[in-house]
Image (cartoon, rainbow, N blue to C red):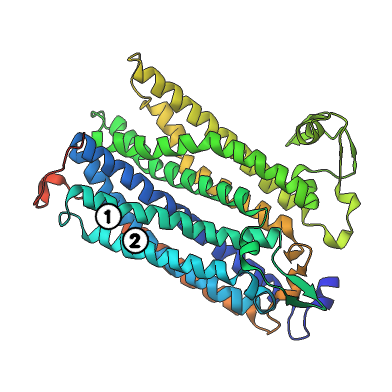
Amino acid sequence: METFAILADAATLADFAAARQQMAFTLGFHIILASIGIGLPAITLLAEWRALRTGDEVYAELARRWMKAAGVLFAVGAVSGTVLSFEMGTLWPGFMDTYGQVFGAAFAMEGIAFFIEAIFMGIYLYGWDRLPPRTHFLTGIPVVIAGLMSASFVVTVNAWMNNPRGFTLVDGEVTEVDPIAAMLNPNTPVQAAHLILASLMVCGFTVASVYAVALLRDHRRGRPLDPYHRRGFAIPFTLGAICAPLQVLVGDWAVRHVHEHQPIKFAAMEGIEHTGGGQPFKFAIFEIPGALSLMTTFDVNGVLRGLDSFPVGERPPAEVVRIGFELMIAIGVALLALAAWWALAWWRHRKGRRDLPYRPWFLRIAAPAGVAAMVAMEAGWTTTEVGRQPWIVYGVMRTEEAVNPSPGLRFGLYAVLAVYAVLTVATISVLRRMRRRPERAQERPRPREVEVVG
């Protein structure tokens, strides 16, 4: 009832819940598309680079197919991103009215990066068989760079919400605004690195999953493995495998940063109920006495704050945060083990001892890796966003203070669910049609040969 008392008279708890659910759903939908949009151009350029180096037309065909899929997902991502932009103003006007001037520059710069990405993606797609090979390859580099920049600028806003800087509050009014300080808040480097690596992992493992299924189909039919499927699996899976150990290091950095700047979120993530020394490391049913204190403070008897040291009204939903954090960690460890398996197989392959592990039992484990990576990303975002509650701007503005007081917000949620259902079906239909009707190198005109470099 405390939350209801803070809400404006025209709002209801149902509308408040609907606003949060709508934002969570659209953000969760968009972040997967954005992740693939970051990674797919990168693996496309890797494939085209291999085509230029080796003259192998299979690599060129993979690059062509992947960038066409990236174009489709880019268009869908532009729609879902636009919806998110409108939701910021329509669902959370208190937040935008008060603090929009602080972080608005980051959104403006993200828009510039988005347009650069769109322009060069159009040039890259149109330039197939129209530009010299090296020139065409170079036109794809700005797509990758602009995608990374766009993601980074957006993340600065969320990082600022978790660690607000660059303004002064005087009687509830924002003064002395410094947009650069807001963007360069202490949370930005770690959160940007964590998101970019997660995005590359999601894209790499997801694309590889498609080809893992195709290779399993080749096994089931008893025919030789298609080189197109083998290379289509190897390039994105290698990208995901390289990012997996890096993400472990960045994840440790992120947890330590949360411990320093958001101790209540850290307590919820680690399941610390009571303040004290010698805190155990707990994961699911397992518990190691003193390990969490040792890992965090480098002292087995180090004191860590528990949830009981914070007012009840400022505590996040601890169980949701804890489950999301553990799920992310569990999947991350599993993907790291899979990456290590692939790295060992690659090393042995380079030594001439054994071929890469395209056997059915490996592919059956690799096939669901894409879905697992998506679940891990959603779990991580749940930990980040729910762990900040009840604040929309940590320690400064509560979420219920930012919501639109107008009634009927729940009807917007119903409309968004319907529209996104249609959008999802249409997107999957187009991608499946592209899969069923692949282009073959011998079927299309070849006004230029693939150039062999070096």
Left or right of 217, for residue 147 = right
Give the quadrant of residue 22: bottom right
Q: CA distance from mark 1 to mark 2?
A: 10 Å
Residue at the (36%, 64%) spot, across then down: 118
Which dot marks residue 72? Answer: 2
The answer, for residue 432, to whether it is visible in the render is no
Q: Position of residue 405 (x, y in %)?
A: 71, 82
Question: Pointer 1 and pointer 2: residues touching (CB < 8 Å)?
Answer: yes
Q: Quadrant of the N terminus?
A: bottom right
292 over 168 or under it: above or below:
above
SS category of the residue bearing label 1 = helix
The C terminus, quarter of image: top left
Q: Classify mark 2: helix, strand or loop.
A: helix
Above or below, 401 against 117 in this view is below
Q: Which residue is mark 1?
A: 434
Give the mark nearer the N terminus: 1 vs 2.
Answer: 2
Q: Residues within 10 Å of mark 2 (few under 14, many from 20)?
A: some
Quick check: 47 left or right of 197? left
Q: Quadrant of residue 178?
A: bottom right
Q: Residues within 10 Å of mark 1 (few under 14, many from 20)?
A: some
Residue occupying the point 46% across, 68% down: 111
Q: Residue at x 45, y 22 (%)?
A: 344
Q: Amino acid at mark 2?
A: Val
Residue 108 is at least partly visible in this image = yes
In front of the other: 278 or 422? 278
Looking at the rendered structure, the number of numbered marks drawn on it comes to 2
